[in-house]
Image (spheres, rainbow, N blue to C red):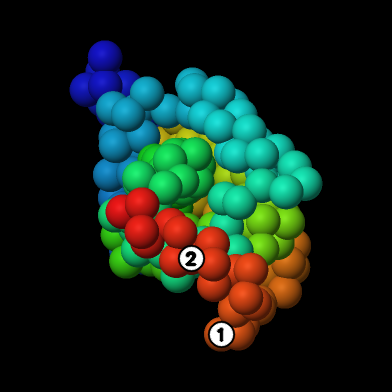
Amino acid sequence: KLMLGQAMIAAKRDAVAAKGPKLTKGQEASDREFGKEYAQHQAAGGFSDVEKQLKQLGAVAAELEKEGNDYTGPVVGLVPDKARAFTNQAAVDAKNKVEEVAQRNLRLVLGAQFTQVEGERLIARAYNPSLDPKTNALRVRALENQIRIAAKQKQAAIDYFEENGTLSGFKGAMPTLSDFEEAIDKAAPKQSASGKISPKGKSALDAALEKY
């Protein structure tokens, strides 16, 4: 099915080229690169389950918004990851959900822009265990919304590519990594976690490490 789709796109591209002005070398190179992204996108099932996955981000944000939760914060951020798995499994699960959804969907919408390093950096920006839960909730909501926007933008480009066999003439916006960075930073300005720990916080940290 994928090979048939690629063959149809190639045929449409040839038909468009025959009718209109010849594509430049740059346009042809752009189409080749997008063609690779298109193939990967189709092989991965496209955006068929994007809303289902985004609900996971919404669920994490909802938990972070609850009063008194201890998913993140200055004390939690000081607990080693291995220890946190024993002392605060819910917090570990929440972080894992954000990472899982973000990694999969960022790769789909950003294509060649996405790298493992960039993905990890952006996820750390959206979910920082050392920051307070409400700040992380705002950032996770922003990530959820921006993935939804980017998916629509990418789908519009894919539809155009399928119809015309080329991206030449496409006037829509394409999602970029900076879109995500800007959305997350606007949702909750950058903070630096305080190095000061209250007596109560120190006791909680000591208790967590003792359990481990």
Residue beneath disc 2: 205
Foreground residue among 65 and 33: 65
The three-letter amino acid code for the residue at tag 2 is Leu
- The disc placed on residue 23 is none
* Badge 1: residue crowd in 10 Å (few <14, some 14–19, many ≥20): few
Position of the C terminus, as image quadrant, is bottom left
Residue at 63%, 33% in the rendered image: 59
Residue 151 picture location, percent across and down: 56, 39
Foreground residue among 96 and 144: 96
Residue 94 picture location, percent across and down: 50, 42
Q: Is residue 201 above or below residue 116?
A: below
166 left or right, relative to 69: left
Using the numbered discs, state the Cα–Cα distance from disc 1 to disc 2 in whole angstroms.
13 Å
Q: Which secondary structure, mark 1? A: loop
* Badge 2: residue crowd in 10 Å (few <14, some 14–19, many ≥20): some
Q: Is residue 172 above or below residue 90?
A: below
Residue at 43%, 41% in the rendered image: 89
* Residue depth check, mark 1 versus mark 2: number of the one nearer the observer: 2
- The disc placed on residue 195 is 1
The three-letter amino acid code for the residue at tag 1 is Gly
Residue at 45%, 59% in the rendered image: 207
Q: Is residue 162 above or below residue 205?
A: above
